[in-house]
Image: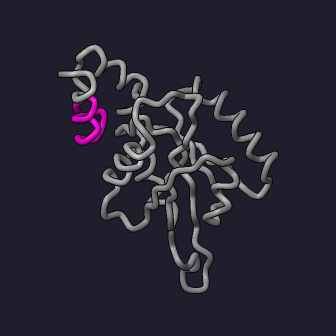
């Protein structure tokens, strides 16, 4: 965690980028890297949600995300099992960034944003459209491709690719 959330006399602009990241994809990485261009600090929140039955443990997911941003001092990666607004408040974030691939993502994300606004009116949700190169990409699709022995190269970081092949074979 950062010791001081002040940048000189200015308050640091902190954003939370939440997700289950099961696994992290190159689409997630693109959104987070673009968030780094807009904010002073980016907190990547890896959700602990037992109802989702993730393929990867929370420890593995944290490791994959941390590896993806190794050496990037703007990025902090932490797990959370609380309300997202409580997690954001823990880091002084007033913005939650959510990536959208298509219009179909918007309805669910809009509902979540409205609930978060009800829980904490001081926190805004910012939607960022994914890069067109990743509009088709999801963690679920990556896992399905790997399960059927398809090639996931270029869809996920190398360590994730290798781990998927360990699990499902090549």
> Is residue 156 placed above or below 72 in the rendered structure?
above
Q: Give the range drawn in magenta.
A: 153-164
Residue at (26, 22) in percent of width and height = 168
In this rendering, position of residue 114 left or right of residue 4: right
| Quarter of image, res 56 | top left
**Camera-side residue: 159 or 92?**
159
Q: Position of residue 140 (x, y in %)?
A: 43, 24
**Camera-side residue: 106 or 69?**
69
Q: On the rendered image, what quadrant is the C terminus found in?
A: top left
Q: Position of residue 60 (x, y in %)?
A: 37, 43
> Is residue 20 placed above or below 17 in the rendered structure?
above
> Is residue 73 placed above or below 108 in the rendered structure?
below
In this rendering, position of residue 65 left or right of residue 112: left
- Name the outermost residue toward the left: 170
> Is residue 1 placed above or below 144 in the rendered structure?
below
In this rendering, position of residue 57 left or right of residue 100: left
Q: Where is residue 127 in the image (x, y as percent from the top left)?
A: 59, 43
| Quarter of image, res 55 | top left
């Amino acid at each position: 965690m950062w010791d001081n959330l002040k940048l000189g006399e200015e308050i640091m602009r902190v954003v939370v980028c939440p997700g289950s990241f099961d696994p992290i994809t190159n689409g997630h990485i693109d959104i987070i890297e673009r968030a780094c261009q807009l904010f002073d600090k980016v907190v990547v929140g890896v959700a602990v949600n037992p109802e989702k039955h993730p393929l990867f443990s929370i420890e593995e997911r944290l490791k994959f995300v941390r590896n993806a941003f190794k050496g990037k001092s703007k990025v902090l990666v932490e797990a959370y099992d609380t309300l997202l607004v409580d997690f954001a408040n823990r880091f002084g974030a007033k913005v939650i960034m959510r990536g959208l691939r298509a219009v179909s993502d918007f309805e669910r994300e809009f509902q979540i944003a409205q609930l978060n606004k009800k829980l904490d009116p001081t926190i805004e949700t910012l939607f960022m459209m994914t890069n067109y190169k990743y509009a088709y990409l999801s963690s679920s699709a990556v896992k399905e491709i790997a399960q059927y022995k398809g090639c996931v190269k270029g869809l996920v970081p190398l360590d994730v690719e290798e781990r998927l092949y360990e699990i499902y074979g090549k």
